[in-house]
Image (tube, helix red, strand yellow):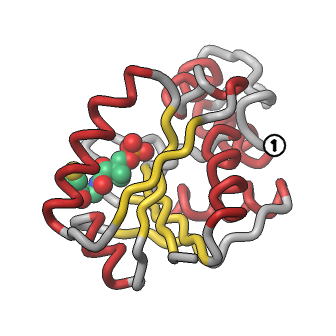
Amino acid sequence: MPKALYPGSFDPITYGHLDIIERAEKIFDDLIVGIVENPRKETLFSPAERKELALAALEEEGIGVSKVITFDGLLVNCAKSHDRESIVRGLRANSDFEYEFQMALTNRDLAPNIESVFLMTSGEYSFLSSSIVKEVKELGGDVSTFVPRVVEKKLAEKFSVPD
Ligand code: PNS
Protein backbone atom coordinates (compact mmCIF):
# COMPACT_ATOMS: atom_id res chain seq x y z
CA MET A 1 0.00 0.00 0.00
CA PRO A 2 1.25 3.53 -0.74
CA LYS A 3 2.41 5.74 2.05
CA ALA A 4 0.22 8.76 2.71
CA LEU A 5 0.28 12.27 4.11
CA TYR A 6 -2.85 13.78 5.67
CA PRO A 7 -2.27 17.56 5.63
CA GLY A 8 -4.29 20.35 7.16
CA SER A 9 -4.38 23.32 9.50
CA PHE A 10 -5.76 21.28 12.44
CA ASP A 11 -6.60 24.46 14.37
CA PRO A 12 -7.54 22.50 16.43
CA ILE A 13 -7.94 18.83 15.53
CA THR A 14 -11.58 17.65 15.75
CA TYR A 15 -13.45 14.34 15.75
CA GLY A 16 -13.97 14.95 12.01
CA HIS A 17 -10.19 14.86 11.43
CA LEU A 18 -9.78 11.88 13.74
CA ASP A 19 -12.45 9.99 11.83
CA ILE A 20 -10.55 10.56 8.56
CA ILE A 21 -7.26 9.53 10.21
CA GLU A 22 -8.76 6.36 11.64
CA ARG A 23 -10.19 5.37 8.27
CA ALA A 24 -7.06 6.32 6.30
CA GLU A 25 -5.03 4.19 8.70
CA LYS A 26 -6.96 1.14 7.48
CA ILE A 27 -6.18 1.93 3.84
CA PHE A 28 -2.55 3.02 4.05
CA ASP A 29 0.27 1.18 5.75
CA ASP A 30 1.94 4.34 6.83
CA LEU A 31 0.16 7.62 7.53
CA ILE A 32 1.78 10.93 8.51
CA VAL A 33 -0.36 13.80 9.77
CA GLY A 34 1.10 17.06 8.40
CA ILE A 35 0.23 20.33 10.11
CA VAL A 36 0.81 23.38 7.94
CA GLU A 37 2.80 26.01 9.82
CA ASN A 38 1.55 29.09 8.01
CA PRO A 39 -1.91 28.55 6.56
CA ARG A 40 -3.46 31.36 4.58
CA LYS A 41 -5.88 31.94 7.43
CA GLU A 42 -4.90 33.18 10.87
CA THR A 43 -4.73 30.40 13.46
CA LEU A 44 -5.72 30.36 17.11
CA PHE A 45 -2.98 27.89 18.03
CA SER A 46 0.71 27.99 17.10
CA PRO A 47 2.13 25.15 14.97
CA ALA A 48 3.73 23.63 18.09
CA GLU A 49 0.42 23.83 20.01
CA ARG A 50 -1.51 22.28 17.09
CA LYS A 51 0.99 19.43 16.93
CA GLU A 52 0.86 18.88 20.69
CA LEU A 53 -2.95 18.85 20.61
CA ALA A 54 -3.05 16.44 17.65
CA LEU A 55 -0.69 14.04 19.45
CA ALA A 56 -2.67 14.27 22.69
CA ALA A 57 -6.00 13.79 20.88
CA LEU A 58 -4.68 10.76 18.98
CA GLU A 59 -3.48 9.28 22.25
CA GLU A 60 -6.78 10.01 24.00
CA GLU A 61 -8.69 8.26 21.21
CA GLY A 62 -6.22 5.37 20.97
CA ILE A 63 -5.41 6.05 17.33
CA GLY A 64 -1.85 5.35 16.21
CA VAL A 65 -0.24 7.17 13.29
CA SER A 66 3.31 6.87 12.16
CA LYS A 67 4.12 10.52 12.83
CA VAL A 68 2.72 14.01 13.34
CA ILE A 69 4.85 16.70 11.71
CA THR A 70 4.62 20.41 10.96
CA PHE A 71 5.60 21.69 7.55
CA ASP A 72 6.16 24.96 5.77
CA GLY A 73 6.04 25.68 2.04
CA LEU A 74 4.49 23.54 -0.64
CA LEU A 75 2.53 20.48 0.37
CA VAL A 76 3.94 18.40 -2.49
CA ASN A 77 7.49 19.18 -1.32
CA CYS A 78 6.60 17.95 2.13
CA ALA A 79 5.05 14.80 0.62
CA LYS A 80 8.16 14.19 -1.50
CA SER A 81 10.58 14.73 1.34
CA HIS A 82 8.70 12.14 3.40
CA ASP A 83 8.52 9.69 0.54
CA ARG A 84 4.70 9.85 0.25
CA GLU A 85 2.82 8.62 -2.82
CA SER A 86 -0.59 9.84 -1.64
CA ILE A 87 -2.19 12.90 -0.10
CA VAL A 88 -5.36 12.23 1.89
CA ARG A 89 -8.10 14.82 2.30
CA GLY A 90 -11.55 14.60 3.85
CA LEU A 91 -14.61 15.82 1.96
CA ARG A 92 -17.58 17.03 3.95
CA ALA A 93 -20.09 18.62 1.66
CA ASN A 94 -20.42 19.98 -1.83
CA SER A 95 -18.95 23.24 -0.58
CA ASP A 96 -15.55 21.56 -0.04
CA PHE A 97 -15.42 20.19 -3.56
CA GLU A 98 -14.33 23.16 -5.62
CA TYR A 99 -11.45 24.10 -3.36
CA GLU A 100 -10.29 20.50 -3.04
CA PHE A 101 -10.56 19.93 -6.79
CA GLN A 102 -8.47 23.01 -7.49
CA MET A 103 -5.88 22.01 -4.91
CA ALA A 104 -5.69 18.42 -6.17
CA LEU A 105 -5.21 19.51 -9.78
CA THR A 106 -2.54 22.03 -8.80
CA ASN A 107 -0.73 19.44 -6.73
CA ARG A 108 -0.91 16.94 -9.58
CA ASP A 109 0.56 19.50 -11.92
CA LEU A 110 3.40 20.16 -9.48
CA ALA A 111 3.97 16.49 -8.65
CA PRO A 112 2.34 14.07 -11.13
CA ASN A 113 3.43 11.00 -9.17
CA ILE A 114 1.58 11.99 -6.02
CA GLU A 115 -2.08 11.02 -6.00
CA SER A 116 -4.74 12.88 -4.00
CA VAL A 117 -7.20 10.55 -2.31
CA PHE A 118 -10.48 11.77 -0.85
CA LEU A 119 -12.44 10.17 1.95
CA MET A 120 -16.05 11.17 2.49
CA THR A 121 -16.67 12.32 6.02
CA SER A 122 -18.93 10.27 8.24
CA GLY A 123 -22.43 11.78 8.23
CA GLU A 124 -22.25 12.73 11.89
CA TYR A 125 -19.27 15.04 11.20
CA SER A 126 -20.39 16.48 7.90
CA PHE A 127 -21.21 19.86 9.49
CA LEU A 128 -18.14 19.99 11.71
CA SER A 129 -15.19 22.35 11.25
CA SER A 130 -12.44 23.72 13.47
CA SER A 131 -13.87 27.22 12.93
CA ILE A 132 -17.31 26.23 14.20
CA VAL A 133 -15.77 24.51 17.22
CA LYS A 134 -13.78 27.65 18.10
CA GLU A 135 -16.81 29.89 17.72
CA VAL A 136 -19.02 27.68 19.90
CA LYS A 137 -16.40 27.38 22.65
CA GLU A 138 -15.55 31.07 22.63
CA LEU A 139 -19.23 31.80 23.21
CA GLY A 140 -19.35 29.37 26.12
CA GLY A 141 -21.00 26.42 24.35
CA ASP A 142 -20.35 22.73 24.90
CA VAL A 143 -18.01 21.22 22.30
CA SER A 144 -17.57 17.82 23.94
CA THR A 145 -19.23 16.02 21.03
CA PHE A 146 -16.92 17.76 18.52
CA VAL A 147 -13.44 17.43 20.03
CA PRO A 148 -11.59 15.19 22.50
CA ARG A 149 -11.38 16.31 26.13
CA VAL A 150 -7.79 17.52 25.85
CA VAL A 151 -8.73 19.87 22.99
CA GLU A 152 -11.79 21.19 24.80
CA LYS A 153 -9.65 22.00 27.85
CA LYS A 154 -7.08 23.86 25.77
CA LEU A 155 -9.84 25.84 24.03
CA ALA A 156 -11.29 26.84 27.40
CA GLU A 157 -7.85 28.06 28.49
CA LYS A 158 -7.32 30.01 25.27
CA PHE A 159 -10.67 31.77 25.44
CA SER A 160 -10.68 32.07 29.25
CA VAL A 161 -14.11 30.44 29.45
CA PRO A 162 -15.31 27.73 31.85
CA ASP A 163 -14.12 24.24 30.92
O1 PNS B 1 -7.12 22.19 6.83
P1 PNS B 1 -6.97 23.08 5.64
O2 PNS B 1 -6.77 24.51 6.07
O3 PNS B 1 -8.11 22.94 4.66
O4 PNS B 1 -5.62 22.61 4.88
C1 PNS B 1 -5.15 23.29 3.73
C2 PNS B 1 -3.76 22.78 3.29
C3 PNS B 1 -2.76 22.81 4.45
C4 PNS B 1 -3.85 21.37 2.80
C5 PNS B 1 -3.31 23.72 2.13
O5 PNS B 1 -3.41 25.05 2.53
C6 PNS B 1 -1.87 23.47 1.68
O6 PNS B 1 -1.59 22.50 1.02
N1 PNS B 1 -0.93 24.36 2.06
C7 PNS B 1 0.46 24.26 1.70
C8 PNS B 1 0.82 25.25 0.57
C9 PNS B 1 0.61 24.64 -0.79
O7 PNS B 1 1.15 23.61 -1.13
N2 PNS B 1 -0.22 25.32 -1.61
C10 PNS B 1 -0.51 24.88 -2.94
C11 PNS B 1 -1.56 23.76 -2.96
S1 PNS B 1 -2.85 24.22 -3.97
Q: Position of residue 82 (x, y in %)?
A: 41, 83
Residue in view at x 42 percent, y 77 percent: 84
Picture coordinates of residue 29 (x, y %)? 64, 76
In the rendered image, residue 95, in percent from the top left (x then y), is placed at: 38, 21
Eyeballing the image, is 70 above or below 140? Answer: below
Residue 80 visible in this rendered orientation of the protein: yes
Is residue 157 at least partly visible in the picture?
A: no
- State which quadrant residue 80 falls in: bottom left
Relative height, residue 74 to residue 103 (above, below): below
> Where, by quadrant of the figure, is residue 78 drawn?
bottom left
For the C terminus, give its image quadrant: top right
Which three-letter amino acid code belongs to the residue tagged 1?
Arg
**Taking 23 as reference, is 36 left or right?**
left
Q: 135 above or below 17?
A: above
For the residue pair 47 and 110, the one nearer the viewer reads as: 110
Quadrant of residue 124 in the image?
top right
Count up the numbered dots: 1
Q: Is mark 1 within 8 Å of ligand 1?
A: no
Classify 10 Å Cα crowding around label 1: few (below 14), some (14-19), many (20 and above). Answer: some
Q: Residue at x 32, y 69 (%)?
A: 114
Question: Which residue is identified by label 1?
Answer: 149
Query: What residue is at 47 percent from the left and 67 percent from the top?
Result: 5
Name the residue: 70% across, 40% down: 15
Q: Quadrant of the N terminus?
A: bottom right
Residue 25 x, y percent position in the rendering: 68, 64
* Residue 21 located left or right of residue 77: right
Viewer-closest of 150 and 6:
6
Q: Which secondary structure lies at badge 1? A: helix
Tell me: residue 20, above or below residue 31: above
